[in-house]
Amino acid sequence: MKEIIKKRSEILFIYDVTDANPNGDVDENKPRIDEETGYNIVTDVRLKRTIRDYLHDFKEQEIFVREERDNEGALKTKEDIYETYGSPDEVIKRCIDIRLFGGTFALKKRDDKKKKTEEAEEEKPTERAFALTGPVQFKFGRSLHRIGEPTFVRGTTVMPSQEKKGAGTFWETYILPYSLIAFYGIINENAAKDTGLTEKDVELLLDGIWNGTKNLITRSKVGQIPRLLLQVIYKEKNYHIGELDHRIKLVKNNPNQKDEEIRRIDEIKLDVTELADVLEKNKDKIEKIRYKKDKYLEIIKNGKTIEINEIVDGIKFEEINF
């Protein structure tokens, strides 16, 4: 029997995008910007889609939230897809995204106690909602600096469209010149009991966060690079620090440079001074910190460059290998 996780952990994930659109809105597919602050926003749904696609395409994992069509070419609903499994237990057993993120859908069920009447030749199925809270939850991702207005780009293709066979067609898109984005998440050991989330599932989750981001190579997503992944694992039950993404900040190498002018990872540093302080205060409650770091991200603490495993003395740091 696979081991269900027993300890709570927090996730801090940082990645950047260059000349790409990390998460378009539903109207114009423009990058999402907080109008009050000018910071870039990425939804948790986008990160979960990244993880799902990677686990399905590269790790041969079965996922429930997927695009599937019937014989007539129409998209199937999640209730249609559920019918292929037959029971919630079977969905949980087979689909890693349900074990990770949970799910909600309607289940059709016949009431065998009802008798057929002369007016009704067949019983109508009743429906009941099935809701499963996922043990892995993320906040919206947010850039660590102001972005400014997205860049609007237009171009032409050589190949003509069906409507205009005599000439190529126009395309247009919105991109961000640069954005360094932080995601925060929690893995809840209590909810894991309901979905059967295992240690192996968590390893695949971390793999999906890092390598899923790295493998987003569509035109709108190419240029996304994972920079830092931390998993803080606690030994004290029902405890976590919270808001680790608020404990870090971006520092520009050139203090006169505007946030909106940043274009490369080597123009900035990640200041973890506040994160180090809060980890130091809670180190008796922390079992270990697992990490993966890109070599081009420079980490500083109290103004000095450090390695990620030097943030706090007395805490075990373990590099993630996948």
Image (cartoon, rainbow, N blue to C red):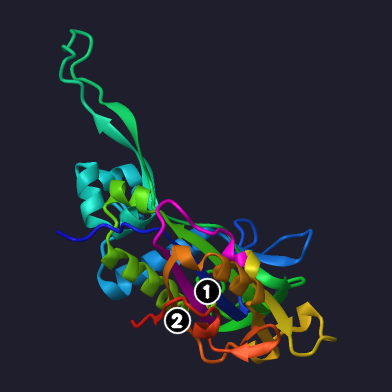
Report if residue 244 lies within the magenta region: yes
Tell how many labels.
2
Quadrant assignment for the C terminus = bottom left
Residue projecting furthest to the top: 118
Is 130 within the magenta?
no
Up-down relation of residue 181 to residue 297 (above or below):
above
Evaluate whether residue 75 shows in this view.
no
At horizontal 66% and vertical 70% (from top left) the residue drawn is 143
Which mark, residue 200?
none
Against 102, is 169 above or below? below
Circle 1 packing at 10 Å, graded few (<14), some (14-19), many (20+), is few
Read off the magenta span: 224-245
Locate residue 22, reporting x and y percent. Answer: 58, 71
Q: On the picture, is 262 further left or further right than 211?
A: right
Q: Front-most of 257 and 238?
A: 238
Q: Residue at x 42, y 77 (%)?
A: 316
Query: What residue is drawn where x is 29% and y is 44%?
Result: 80
Q: Secondary structure at mark 2?
A: strand
Q: Nearer the viewer, residue 245 or 238?
A: 238
Q: Count neighbours of disc 2 (C-alpha within 10 A) and say few if under 14, some if 14 to 19, many if 20 or more.
A: many
Q: Quadrant of residue 40?
A: bottom right
User: Which of pointers 1 and 2 lies earlier in the amino acid sequence?
Assistant: 1
SS of the residue at dot 1? loop
The image quadrant of residue 50 is bottom left
The amino acid type found where label 1 is placed reads: Ser
**Residue 223 place in picture, x, y as percent:** 55, 83
Residue 292 bears which disc, if any?
2
Residue 313 percent coordinates (x, y) = 51, 80
Residue sitting at x 54%, y 78%: 312
| Residue bearing the label numbered 1 | 161
